[in-house]
Image (tube, grey):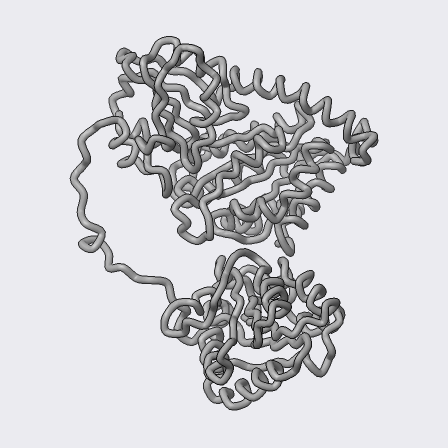
């Protein structure tokens, strides 16, 4: 008898992976992907089977760990948000060259509308760039089924598979029927062609030619995939190509059935034979896809009929932001549904640092000291403390990506900025700040690095931080002079001491590190409730 559960899209993916015989999940927390790993960490089947489920230091190490598990013949899952794909791009691209031995699935959760991100990048481009198959589910049920199929496909074709979710798919719930079939884990089995896994040019050239040949097979597989299909419609004035969750939105607007022919696309490479078949019967095409116009751009040159293609490029669908059922409705020329203004539903609440957060006290002390330095610049990073840019603190001048605070401070200091201060969190520091600190030491940069240590990965819900209890030792090991590694406790009663330490290290013309340490107020409450 089938088992039914109300699951997030993230949780459906996690459960599907466990039921597919998963041996390890490798991830760094990042919204909207975090719940995949957390679901596996808490699931009794993962504990029973001793599935590896610890957090990795960053997405690059996660990708490499999963690749090592695949090399050993086991099934591995890598999870990250879309910008994490940038961090793991080197091993991700390399994995297309090595291929997969045990099934290897990379789950990338994109964040259109930038609910908690710094850009709207579309991870499908990475799949095309690496000549790797991409799976993009249209519902939570399909997510569960698709990740199981992705592991099978990875082993069948000997290639990693990129699986793309977006925010609404990842964080909305639906009933998922999971069935009773739970696959056993793979036995240890090393690659039949070990040469393929050593990417010296002499081997990589051979593998690259094979990958090009295999890509033609991936295209044929996509054209016949059960996740891609062409459904006919009576009204041939318009043909619709709906990708991933866009298919869900389309059908939501036509509960009695869509009157137009529809091509559903959930497995890539893009199924061109199905697209040609659709175009042959329609006057105009509308492309519905979440994210950037990847499919729409690739339709150019596919047809020789002069057919008109509408989508994001001509703003029939909004060029930026999330795709929504209402945006789909407008693109189809359907009348808008009655809506209530947002102000009538919920009062706007801009993000802010929690009351009682140690970051607040640190920024208060830092701001007080920097009043005396006219040219001071503070380079921020990704985490809760990024909200230090917001009122009432206005402490940060930049925030670009993970780890950039330290290295941007270095470059600015070399340009004459004084004082150049970097603010980075404990988890972000071990994610991608340590190498920047090594650059600072080697270059004798005149910077002050402030590690705001709340003893957790706070922004994504309180996951373990890789450097907890070791930050001083790490900084000393990277070459920072011991006397210029200072620790402060951010509390109002400590403001005079905090300001003195910050001032002294700014006045030191070399690399100094100030560790501002106090546990996140949210994790502190959780720990107290458990006790």
Residue at 75% x, 67% y is: 442
Residue at 49% x, 34% y is: 144
Is residue 84 shown left or right of residue 342?
Answer: right
Counting from the top left corner in percent of width and height, residue 230 is at 41, 16
Q: Relative to 14, say whether 276 is above or below.
A: above
Note whether residue 531 is visible: no
Residue closest to the eye, 457 or 329: 329
Counting from the top left corner in percent of width and height, residue 187 is at 74, 34
Q: How many marks?
A: 0
Q: Which residue lies furthest to the front in this view?
A: 416
Note whether residue 292 is visible: yes
Counting from the top left corner in percent of width and height, residue 57 is at 64, 56
Counting from the top left corner in percent of width and height, residue 298 is at 48, 24
Q: Relative to 393, say whether 88 is above or below.
A: above
Residue at 35% x, 12% y is: 232
Residue closest to the eye, 158 or 2: 158
Residue closest to the eye, 71 or 524: 71
Residue at 49% x, 87% y is: 495
Q: Relative to 94, say whether 332 is above or below.
A: above
Determine which quarter of the picture holds residue 141. top left
Determine which quarter of the picture holds residue 102. top right
Residue closest to the eye, 62 or 521: 62
């Amino acid at each position: 008898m089938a088992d039914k559960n109300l699951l997030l899209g993230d949780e459906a993916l996690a459960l599907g992976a466990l039921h597919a015989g998963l041996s390890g999940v490798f991830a760094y927390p990042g919204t909207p992907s975090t719940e995949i790993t957390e679901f596996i960490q808490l699931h009794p089947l993962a504990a029973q089977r001793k599935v590896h489920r610890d957090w990795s230091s960053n997405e690059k190490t996660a990708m490499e760990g999963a690749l090592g598990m695949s090399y050993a013949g086991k099934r591995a899952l890598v999870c990250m948000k879309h910008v994490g794909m940038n961090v793991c791009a080197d091993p991700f691209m390399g994995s297309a060259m090595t291929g997969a031995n045990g099934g290897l699935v990379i789950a990338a959760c994109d964040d259109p509308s930038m609910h908690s991100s710094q850009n709207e990048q579309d991870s499908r481009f990475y799949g095309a760039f690496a000549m790797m198959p991409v799976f993009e589910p249209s519902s939570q049920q399909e997510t569960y089924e698709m990740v199981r199929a992705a592991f099978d496909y990875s082993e069948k074709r000997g290639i990693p598979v990129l699986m793309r979710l977006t925010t609404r798919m990842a964080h909305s719930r639906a009933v998922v029927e999971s069935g009773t079939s739970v696959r056993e884990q793979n036995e240890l089995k090393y690659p039949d062609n070990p040469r393929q896994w050593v990417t010296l040019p002499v081997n990589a050239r051979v593998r690259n030619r094979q990958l090009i040949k295999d890509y033609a097979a991936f295209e044929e597989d996509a054209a016949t995939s059960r996740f891609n299909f062409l459904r006919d419609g009576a009204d041939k004035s318009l043909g619709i190509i709906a990708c991933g969750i866009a298919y869900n939105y389309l059908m939501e607007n036509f509960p009695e059935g869509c009157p137009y022919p529809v091509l559903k696309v959930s497995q890539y490479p893009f199924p061109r034979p199905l697209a040609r078949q659709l175009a042959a019967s329609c006057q105009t095409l509308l492309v519905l896809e979440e994210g950037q116009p990847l499919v729409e751009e690739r339709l150019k040159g596919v047809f020789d009929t002069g057919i008109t293609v509408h989508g994001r490029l001509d703003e029939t669908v909004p060029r930026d932001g999330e795709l929504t059922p209402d945006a789909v409705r407008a693109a189809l020329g359907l009348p808008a549904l009655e809506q209530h203004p947002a102000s009538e539903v919920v009062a706007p609440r801009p993000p802010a640092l929690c009351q009682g957060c140690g970051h607040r006290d640190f920024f208060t002390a830092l701001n007080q000291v920097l009043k005396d330095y006219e040219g001071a610049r503070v380079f921020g990073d990704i985490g809760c403390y990024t909200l230090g840019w917001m009122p009432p603190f206005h402490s940060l001048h930049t925030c670009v990506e993970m780890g950039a605070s330290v290295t941007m401070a270095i470059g600015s200091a070399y340009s004459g900025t004084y004082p150049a201060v970097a603010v980075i969190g404990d988890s972000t520091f071990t994610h991608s700040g340590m190498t920047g600190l090594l650059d600072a030491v080697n270059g004798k940069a005149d910077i002050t690095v402030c590690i705001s240590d709340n003893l957790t990965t706070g922004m994504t819900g309180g996951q373990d931080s890789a450097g907890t209890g070791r930050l001083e030792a790490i900084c000393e090991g990277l070459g920072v002079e011991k006397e210029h590694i200072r620790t402060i406790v951010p509390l109002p009663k400590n403001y005079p001491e905090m300001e003195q330490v910050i001032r002294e290290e700014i006045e030191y013309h070399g690399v100094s590190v100030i560790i501002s340490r106090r546990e996140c107020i949210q994790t502190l409450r959780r720990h107290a409730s458990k006790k």
